[in-house]
Image (cartoon, rainbow, N blue to C red):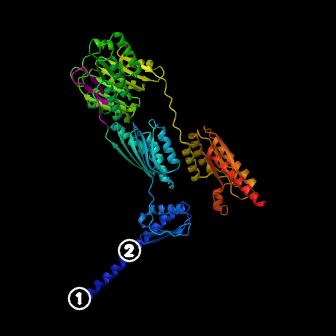
Amino acid sequence: MRVFALLFALFGLIGGSAVAWVYADRVITRLETRNVTRLASALRASEISWPSLRADGQLLIVSGPAPDDAAAALVLQMAADVLPAALVSDATQRSEGQTATGRAERIQPPRLEILRSDAGISLMGRAPSGPALSALRAALTALPNGGGVANLVDVTDDPVTPDWNAAVEFALRALSQTPEATLTIMPGHVTIETVASTSGWQEGLAELLEHMRPPDVALELNILAPRPVISPFRFAFDLTGESPVFECAARNEDEAAGIIAAAEAAGLPAGLGECAIGIGAPSELWGMVVGRSLATLSALGSGKLEIIDTDIIFTDVSAPLAVLGSTEISLRAELPAIYSVRPLGQVAQAAPAPVATPGQNGWGPRFLAIRDADGYVVLRGMVRDTLTSKVISSYAESRFGYEHVQNDFVETSDLPDGWQARIFTALDALTLLDTGQATITANAFVLRGTGALPDLEAELHTMLEISLGAGNFNLQVVQTEPLVVDEPLMDARLCAARVATILAENQISFAPSSAVIEDSSAGVITDLGLLLHECRHVDFQIGGHTDSQGREEMNAALSQSRANAVVDALLSQNLLMGQLSAFGYGESQPIASNDTEEGRAANRRIEILPLDEAQALQAAATEEEDSTAEEVEDTNE
């Protein structure tokens, strides 16, 4: 019985080992087959047929006669994308007859980093040359702060992959939405790090970028917390006492440095200046306004300066009234219309009462609604309760966009009747202004600003009179010229690349031996028409090409007729386009062998190139033909 048990255990062990070996063999075989199949599929899709593939366990061996080192490097890169580069063995035969042995080295993938801020733009990293990189450079230069782009890119001859082009194109679209950000571009992946101006803006940016993101590009979005709200936005400067007084708020570090430099030029001892950084400035020109006001104070020789939101107040100024009057007029002319200057003559005689902050005794109810030149709206002041604040916030977001509104409310029940309705009136009025500020107190409603709407002052006057009643508001607006904004033009090279992509995916088909476009190509014609409309600043040549079957003269005529037919089909869409010309190349420019049906099919094609590029190619081809003819003539002689 004991011997039987031992034999049973022995057979069980042998059987289990056999089963494990069979299972392991099947797993390894499946792994080998999968690796070879994946790489073979990629090679077929790229029309690469020279490599031979063999799997040995986890090792993938690539062999065969490579046309050149670049072709071998491309295949090894594709293999390294299938499995780790350490598991790819290079046994290819190069053009010199040598066989390369050893592990494949992964080509370092392209990577670009864009640093964008108020100070400028930096572009660094390594990337393959081509239309995508050119379009990115052009887009950066065209940005508002792109005049001095620091270009530190190492341009390589590496192959350009579709996932790289897709990532660059997505980054191009995201640039306009991220004024202060770091963008990192890699094949099929874009990382964006930025600072949110408000929590609503943060949510809006994430939603917008996700909507813009192509399905084959991964997005990693890192949004830092928004900067604090400074309310009121205040600047104070006083050198009349025993110790200097300097209080400063600024939108960013660069603006703070400019304000401090202006204050030191006006007499502030070096090293004493410091500005709080935050949002809530009444306009993007806050730094300029502070600098001009400081220059005015210096010109007057003495006094104190205080700027609270859009109110500019000079006190303790000693100068003749004539000088004060002319100085006041000059300063008003230099500042945006939303800023008010307290009459200097009155200030010289009596200083105004100190301004308190919301909630302090002595101020009373106060509410400010400010819209800057970028369309951002800051609301701050007193509301009745939490429900009222939510209603006001929702209403403002519906008028200006939830990503453009920042709130800073103080809840208090001691408010006049109709307070909420007056706030809604202020928000409605701001929608008609390009920049502006509405100030609401218990006894006053003041609206100042600028706008390009025709009959702006009359429109606002009617609106306020209906809502508030005649004589219950103070309206100070400046009519400006409408801003003409030209749509940014797509780079010509990017236009050419997108045209080539459309034709690479679906060529225009014709009936055999004719210039009649088949119905199956209607969608391609439509797509090309829309793209050429978007690229209407570029002139294109429609080139017709045939295979070598038939007489050369007949092929030239057929290709010209087909090119003419494509031009007519594009123009029939009645879209504005650049100049379109047609040229028949016949059989003179094959891209594949005419000895096979597949090659002849590839040679029967339509190419659309920018006109200057097509003309350059034509000139080069003509020069080559002339050179060949001369060689033949010399040989005959």
| Up/down of 273 relative to 578, above or below | above
- The amino acid on which the numbered mark 2 sits, given as a three-letter code, is Ala
Residue 233 on the magenta span: yes
For the magenta stretch, what is the residue range?
227-249
| Left or right of residue 204, residue 633 in this image | right
The N terminus lies in which quarter of the figure?
bottom left
Mark 1 residue crowding within 10 angstroms, few (<14) / some (14–19) / many (20+):
few
Residue at image location 48% in from the left, 44% down from the top: 136
Which quarter of the rendered picture does the C terminus lie within?
A: bottom right
Where does the image place residue 2, in percent across and percent down from the top left? 23, 88
Q: How many marks?
A: 2
Location of mark 1 (residue): 2
Residue position for label 2: 24
Name the one closer to the observer, 149 or 233.
149
Number of residues whose C-alpha sits closer than 10 Å to that of mark 2, classed few (under 14), some (14–19) or many (20 or more): few
Image coordinates for residue 449, horizontal then vertical, percent: 40, 22
Q: Quadrant of residue 234?
A: top left
- Label located before the other in sequence (1 or 2): 1
